[in-house]
Amino acid sequence: MSNLENAPAELVCARADGPGKVLDAREVPLGGPRAMTVRRTLPQREQSLIGAWCFIDHYGPSEGDMRVDGHPHTGLQTVSWLFSGEVEHRDTTGAHAIVRPGEINLMTAGSGIAHSEYSTDASNVLHGTQLWVALPEADRFADPGFQHYAPPAVDHDGARVLVFLGTLLGQTSPVATYTPLLGAEITLRAGQELVLDIDPAFEHGVLVDTGDVMAAGVSAKPGQLVYQPTGPAILTVCAGDDGARVLVLGGVPLGERIVMWWNFIGRSHDEIVAFRDQWEQQRAGGESMRYGTFPAQWSQTLPAPALPNIRLKSRG
């Protein structure tokens, strides 16, 4: 998906691991044709990255159409994960797929890609997340590509678990990433405590979709993100009386500084300027083809926002 921002920029667990901290979401009204509000928990001033995860938007459930016309990306992988609804994906590698609940669509931008996303007629209610992963220096100009995977739903002591990236609870996703990552949807029954064996070299985040939870020793509400740093070998998640659904995200700390603006990830202000200029040149029919051949089905593409009047700073 595109970042269409107009100006981009108590439960008790028997086992408390911690130390966790709660990151509050901020509501971001997205301009342009999608015209919807999302709850953004990453990045923020006190936490830019969790592993290589660099962007977490959580939206819905809401009625209405999603229409995100063709737009570019560089230096990242996008992860589309839905709870309800259906979205049609099309990109400049020739990939054409439907994003459905419980199925991951992962797009590698690498050196440059453009894609579009439109909700289908089957989407009465849209509810899901858009997640971005920063590519490491060695791979950030990798060839663009697309992967799709429908993980099996596994029962673990009454919890429903879908592992869409990495390995958890004996389940491993075949989806390829450029840094070690974890991504899983977990639905907990009422009052359930789930103790996850995790890699202590990973940072982790628990995004609460529904229900009240305690994760990593701290309480969180829907829309909040719990961060647990490297070190612990377990992550404990407890659901309240109504049960809960969460996304567990993790990864080895990226250890690099990045510059992220609009839909681009680079390493310097000047690099971002060049990515933007090449996009605008390609939209105007110029010589630049960094973002691949536009699909014949596209009638329009999104213009890049104006750059700020200050130099973009790195984060991480």
Image (tube, rainbow, N blue to C red):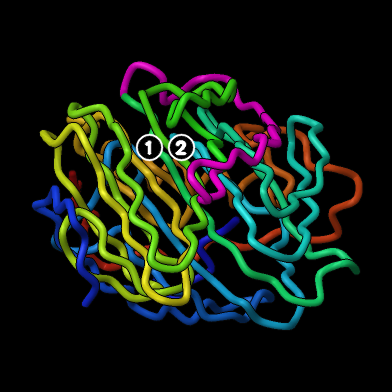
| Nearer to us in this view, 181 or 38 | 181
Q: Quadrant of residue 97?
A: top right
Label 1: few (<14), some or many (≥20) within 10 Å? many
Instruction: Name the spot of residue 277 as percent of width and height, x first.
Output: 50, 48
Q: Which mark is residue 134?
A: 1
Q: Nearer the viewer, residue 158 or 92?
A: 158
Q: Nearer the viewer, residue 293 or 205?
A: 205
Q: Residue at x 49, y 67 (%)?
A: 58
Relative vertical location of residue 302 with respect to residue 297 in this rendering, above or below: below
**Quadrant that contains the N terminus:** bottom right
Q: Between 145 and 226, which is closer to the camera in this rendering?
A: 226
Q: Amino acid at mark 1?
A: Ala
Dot 2, crowdedness within 10 Å: few (<14), some or many (≥20)? many
Residue 143 got which mark? none
Three-letter amino acid code at the position of disc 2 = Leu
Q: Residue at x 74, y 36 (%)?
A: 92
Against 295, is 1 above or below?
A: below
Q: Is residue 271 in view?
A: no
Q: Secondary structure at mark 1?
A: strand
Q: Secondary structure at mark 2?
A: strand
Query: Circle 2 is placed at which residue position?
Result: 76
Q: Is residue 169 visible?
A: yes
Give the spatial CA distance, label 1 vs label 2. Answer: 5 Å
Task: Identify which residue is drawn at 29% across, 32% down.
Answer: 197
Relative image position of residue 222 (x, y in whole percent):
40, 74
Give the x, y percent position of residue 223. Answer: 39, 73
N-terminal label among 1 and 2: 2
Whether pointer 1 and pointer 2 mark residues with C-beta atoms closer than 8 Å, the reply is: yes
x and y percentages locating residue 158 in the rendered image: 53, 50
Asked whether 147 falls inside the magenta stretch, the response is yes
Magenta residues (range): 137-161
